[in-house]
Image (cartoon, rainbow, N blue to C red):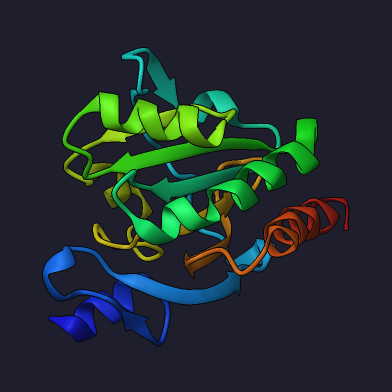
Amino acid sequence: MLAGLLALAGCSSLQGTGDKGYITGTGTVRQVAAVDRGEPINLSGKDLDGAALSLDDLRGKPVVVVVWGSWCTPCRAEAPDVVAAAEELGPDAQFVGINIRNASVAESQGFVRTFGVPYPSFFSPDGKALLSFAGTLTAYTIPSFVVLDEEGRVGASIIGGLPSTTTLVNLVQDLEADLRG
């Protein structure tokens, strides 16, 4: 079973399963050449306020998908860096979260307020939203990041904690440069 999880996660070393019910990667960065990108990721659902949210509505520029949970210690530690990356990239990229495995929306909204998260998040307490990212993420991969290109295709990923704000900003900028190529 672990071998299957490793293959689905697309990284070589995972840690932190135990009774936590999730897998934390080591911050492995993977970039996907434009010619090797698959089909656009389709995901629709509700945000933390119950409003409709869809990745289709974010097409046209890079989208950073942030997988997080308010209960996730690495997610809490990296939240200021993620917010800093969103602010640094400004209108050049869009951010959207996928909040998984929180028992209530209130817990998730508390995280957003505490860390000043400026972007919406899908609310997916069962983690099923991650199934849209099969081959890149597993239903237990948290924290993680996926950078979608302007067409909604996976262009890069970070499995595990964010190495740095600069790493995330550079991935998005590399993706944009690849488009202008």
Q: Position of residue 26 (x, y in %)?
A: 46, 78
Q: Is residue 108 above or below residue 145?
A: above
Q: Say which quarter of the image contains residue 119.
A: top right
Question: With 161 as the anchor, is 61 left or right in this view?
Answer: right
The residue shown at (58%, 73%) is: 29
Q: Is residue 50 above or below residue 164?
A: above
Quadrant where the image shows the C terminus:
bottom right
The residue shown at (52%, 73%) is: 27
Quadrant where the image shows the N terminus:
bottom left
Q: Is residue 151 above or below residue 145?
A: above
Most foreground residue, 74 or 4: 74
The residue shown at (30%, 80%) is: 6
Number of numbered discs present? 0
Q: Is residue 95 above or below residue 181?
A: above
Question: With 65 as the anchor, is 107 left or right in this view?
Answer: left
Q: Say which quarter of the image contains residue 54.
A: top left
Q: Position of residue 163 (x, y in %)?
A: 61, 69
Question: With 167 as the anchor, is 98 left or right in this view?
Answer: left
Q: Is residue 143 visible?
A: no
Most foreground residue, 76 or 30: 76
Residue positioned most to the front = 114
The residue shown at (60%, 47%) is: 80
Q: Position of residue 94 (x, y in %)?
A: 64, 34
Question: With 88 as the anchor, is 120 left or right in this view?
Answer: left
Q: Is residue 107 visible?
A: yes
